[in-house]
Amino acid sequence: MSGQDDTPRPTPEQLAAMSHDELVRLGSTLDDVEIAYRQERWPVPGTRAEKRAERAVAGWFLLAGVSSLAAVAVFLFWPWEYSGAATANHGLYVFYTPLLGTTIGLAILGIGVGVIAYSKKFIPEEISVQQRHTGGSPEVDQKTTVAVLSDSLQTSGIMRRTLIKRSLGFGAGALGIMAVIPLGGLVKNPWAQGDSSPLWTSGWTPTNDEKIYLRRDTGRSDDVVLVRPEDLAAGAIETVFPFRESERGDHEALLAALHRSDNPVMLIRLRPDAAAMVVKRSGQEDFNYGDYYAYSKICTHLGCPTSLYESQTNRILCPCHQSQFDALTYAKPIFGPAARALPQLPIEVDEAGYMVAKGNFIESLGPAFWERKS
Ligand code: FES
């Protein structure tokens, strides 16, 4: 903003003595702003129509406030943890995301429509024309700009419309709270349970010396189908999950074993010619059972499931960012962004002929994290 050269400039003394309105007019003149048309929305103040319009705008802000608080309540109190179709909480759980979306959407809509409605119903209609200027802004321009901005606030009339001011404060305040509250979910101590913290454990972590079987997922969580070596042909792969006898008949436990994100393990039966070329990792020499090798399915890059096993090349592929792991070399990464081998689960066959875990993984599963020990 820069004034025209031919516009008379006030002296500092004159400037200091000017009233608010005079500063506004001076600012417009210096800015080469010509107000071509200006019309108050409500020339006669206090009419019933004006009150009605005021209540309508306030209603939108109130909707925003109530919806924001409802979103906060849903976020804090609604059952959000996964509940399977046959569980008691399933009916509530399925509404968690739709309710959050609806309440947050209404909150944003309420503020947006309220602001638009206010500007259409209460801000004076005005058409102004301003010439463009270049260069910096002298002190007189800076002062008059502040005056013009403050005049805009006064002209908008919002300072004297208490109902709208309060409802806007309520709506915008609640919207702000709604935006900040979810950050609280990030404030957690992942190591609160010591050595039993989720990042150190998985469903394969031994509990009470109970045998852990390799279980097939049939699509029905209550079916328990254990895996025998003869179930896999040479060059085949099967995704398996942990199963303990103490979980038999326990719907929740069986479901949890299938759903825990770091439980899936790829059981691969190598072709005999490929098995002859295997290079074992130091410390994992006895982790396989014959031609059977079990690797965590969770990619060590960013945790996608590395579901693609190509039996001709013995490569395991992660579809997310194309990392490839060599199944003949302890699932070492040979291409792509993953930098760590897929952890290997030690396996054997028990006296009844079922495949079982011989022990736990000896390193953490999935993507790297600062505290990882191996
Ligand atoms: S998550 Fe597997 S390559 Fe990125």
Image: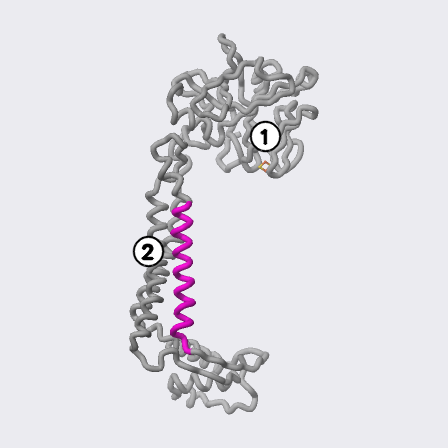
Give the residue at x 42% y 90%: 14
Per the image, the residue denoted by label 1 is 307
- Residue drawn at x 41%, y 66% is 115
Q: Residues within 10 Å of mark 1 (few under 14, many from 20)?
A: some
Magenta segment main secondary structure: helix
How has the structure been colored for display?
Answer: one colour
Q: For the magenta stretch, what is the residue range?
A: 98-124
Report whether 150 appears left or right of 344.
Answer: left
Mark number, residue 66: 2
Is 232 on the left-hand or right-hand side of 369? Answer: right
- Look at the numbered disc 1 and say if its residue's Cβ is closer than 8 Å to ligand 1: no
Badge 2: how crowded within 10 Å, few (<14), some, or many (20+)? many
Give residue 268's quadrant in the image: top right
Q: Residue 175 in the image: x percent, y percent? A: 38, 57
Task: Check the image and name the residue furthest to the front.
Answer: 49
Choose between 121 and 285: the one closer to the eye: 121
Query: Along the polypeptide, which appears first: circle 1 or circle 2?
Result: 2
Q: Indicate whether 80 appears above or below 103.
A: above
Q: Nearer the viewer, mark 1 or mark 2?
A: 2
Magenta stretch holds residue 120? yes
Residue at 43 percent of width and 87 percent of height: 15
**301 drawn magenta:** no
